[in-house]
């Protein structure tokens, strides 16, 4: 069930109408549903119940403190990719001991910060990183828990920008080099080898490649055990896709089903293992937790009839939502108030574009929309990689963010003011 629906022709987020939100908070505004967020997290958590498992939300998808706080209170851990994200987890009351640190370029300062907070694990992506982490841990008199991110070389069949587990990728260690890399790591005195991980890509509608990658990791765990390297956790990464409403596209595997399929394989393998030892399974979902939790509310400024195309110019832009410009992502746009019948221009087709001075500044193309200037529109399924990828291009303040909880609306990030955008700058004296 979606927590965004039309009531008497007016779109609502839970119990609150979108026009009321626009009236109070202005536009563009990201609107999130608390119930949807918790439903999505619970789909993972419930399927993990009774198992040795941890759901580490990949906060790059949406790192608003209020979202992190709600998930932390539900028991989530976090997958971070920077020191800044760790500070957000702590500010939101999350537990650093449930944090895993991914990313190919961790700095010395970031390693120090993370070791200081005793995070659960570093997902290491290269041999130079192993050496750096060993040195930093040694200088602090600590041991760093590590996992190696392995490229299972499974084709995730997604957009090349978001496929990460292939041979040509900058991420992870090649499958064929994994054993040697673990041996190197085992020699380093300030590292403790605890896990293995992968992340093959994002927006995967079919979970088959995810399960194939899991099989390859399991194979490696057995090989390592035969060498005396016993791992305690298996991190399957994120990547499960969501329904963006693209016509003709397959429906994504439901998160609970995917998690159950992971455990079926892990249990079967565990039963066949000679040492009978257990292993913790870690998930790193991002998009499937927050994607359909949010929409981007925007207002039509002008309707413009160009020579070849009609443009619906809105007050949101590529700086608010970069996915169409960056990945040619198809995002669903809908009017907030349904009044097709009253409109003269029914059947008209528009490109929905923002005010930014770039031809690439578009949000949707060739959409039939019964719109007029002043109307409200929403971009649906915009909760993941929306606000976190927003910028201040064209000195545009980033959008406000609100969370709806039943009949209540909470402002969880106010709109940026123009003067704040240059407050850190100075002229040469
Ligand atoms: N773990 C790691 C190591 C990752 O790199 C990512 C995402 C995730 C987990 C979470 O993946 P998810 O469950 O969200 O698919 N900006 C792009 C997506 C980039 C994904 C980057 N890595 C987009 O808007 O489609």
Image: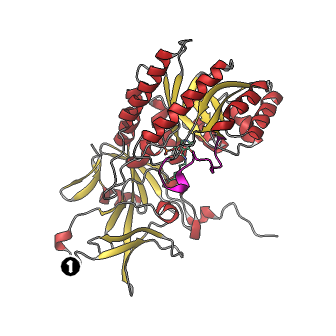
Task: Specify the quadrant of the image occupied by residue 116.
Answer: top right
Q: Which SS does the magenta portion mostly show?
A: loop
Q: Nearer the viewer, residue 403 or 275?
A: 275
Question: Residue 228 at what x, y percent from top left?
Answer: 68, 17
Question: Residue 237 at what x, y percent from top left?
Answer: 53, 37
Q: Is residue 346 left or right of residue 364?
A: left
Task: Specify the quadrant of the image occupied by residue 298.
Answer: bottom left
Which residue: 48% across, 21% down? 269
Residue 157 sits inside the magenta stretch: yes
Q: Is residue 231 above or below residue 388?
A: above
Count all numbered tags in the image, as a single digit.
1
Which residue: 41% across, 35% down? 41
Which image quarter holds the N terminus?
top left
- The answer to whether residue 396 is visible is yes
Task: Specify the quadrant of the image occupied by residue 23.
Answer: bottom left
Q: Nearer the viewer, residue 201 or 373?
A: 201
Q: Which residue ends up furthest to the bottom in the rendered image?
A: 307
Which residue: 55% across, 14% down? 277
Residue 347 sits inside the magenta stretch: no
Q: Is residue 333 left or right of residue 215?
A: left
Color theme of the render: secondary structure
Q: Which residue ends up furthest to the top in the rendered image?
A: 275
| Local crowd size for mark 1, using a 10 Å CA cut-off: few (<14), some (14–19), many (≥20) | few
> Which region shows up in magenta?
156-173
Q: Secondary structure at mark 1?
A: loop
- The answer to whether residue 56 is visible is no
Q: Is residue 98 left or right of residue 353?
A: right
Q: Which residue is mark 1?
A: 344
Question: Residue 377 at what x, y percent from top left?
Answer: 34, 64
Q: Nearer the viewer, residue 220 or 359?
A: 220
């Amino acid at each position: 069930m979606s927590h965004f629906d039309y009531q008497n022709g007016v779109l609502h987020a839970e119990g609150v109408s979108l026009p009321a939100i626009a009236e109070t908070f202005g536009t563009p505004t990201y609107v999130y549903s608390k119930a949807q967020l918790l439903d999505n997290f619970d789909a993972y958590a419930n399927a993990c119940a009774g198992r040795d498992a941890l759901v580490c939300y990949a906060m790059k998808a949406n790192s608003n403190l209020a979202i992190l706080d709600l998930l932390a209170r539900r028991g989530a851990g976090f997958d971070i990719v920077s020191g800044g994200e760790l500070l957000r987890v702590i500010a939101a009351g999350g537990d650093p001991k449930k944090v895993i640190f991914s990313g190919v370029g961790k700095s010395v300062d970031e390693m120090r910060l993370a070791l200081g907070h005793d995070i659960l694990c570093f997902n290491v992506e290269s041999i130079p990183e192993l050496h750096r982490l060993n040195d930093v841990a040694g200088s602090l008199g600590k041991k760093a828990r590590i996992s190696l991110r392995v490229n299972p070389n499974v084709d995730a069949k997604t957009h090349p920008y978001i496929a990460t587990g292939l041979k040509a990728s900058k991420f992870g260690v090649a499958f064929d080099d994994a054993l040697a890399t673990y041996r190197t790591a085992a020699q380093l005195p300030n590292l403790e080898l605890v896990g293995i991980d992968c992340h093959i890509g994002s927006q995967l509608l079919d979970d088959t490649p995810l399960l194939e990658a899991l099989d390859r990791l399991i194979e490696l765990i057995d090989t390592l055990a035969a060498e005396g390297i016993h791992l305690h956790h298996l991190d399957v990464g994120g990547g499960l896709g969501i329904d963006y409403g693209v016509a003709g596209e397959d429906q994504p595997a439901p998160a609970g089903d995917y998690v159950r399929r992971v455990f079926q394989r892990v249990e079967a393998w565990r039963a066949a293992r000679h040492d009978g030892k257990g292993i913790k399974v870690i998930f790193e979902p991002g998009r499937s937790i927050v994607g359909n939790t949010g929409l981007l509310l925007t207002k039509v400024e002008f309707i413009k009839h160009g020579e070849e195309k009609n443009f619906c110019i809105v007050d949101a832009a590529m700086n608010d939502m970069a996915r169409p410009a960056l990945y040619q992502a198809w995002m669903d746009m809908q009017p907030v108030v349904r009044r097709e019948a009253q409109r003269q221009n029914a059947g008209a087709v528009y490109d929905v574009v923002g005010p930014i001075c770039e031809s690439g500044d578009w949000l949707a193309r060739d959409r039939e929309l019964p719109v007029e200037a002043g109307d409200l529109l929403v971009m649906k399924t915009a909760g993941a990689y929306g606000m976190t990828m927003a910028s201040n291009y064209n000195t545009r303040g980033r959008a406000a963010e609100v969370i709806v909880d039943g009949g209540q609306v909470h402002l969880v990030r106010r709109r940026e003011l123009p003067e704040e955008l240059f407050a850190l700058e100075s002229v040469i004296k």
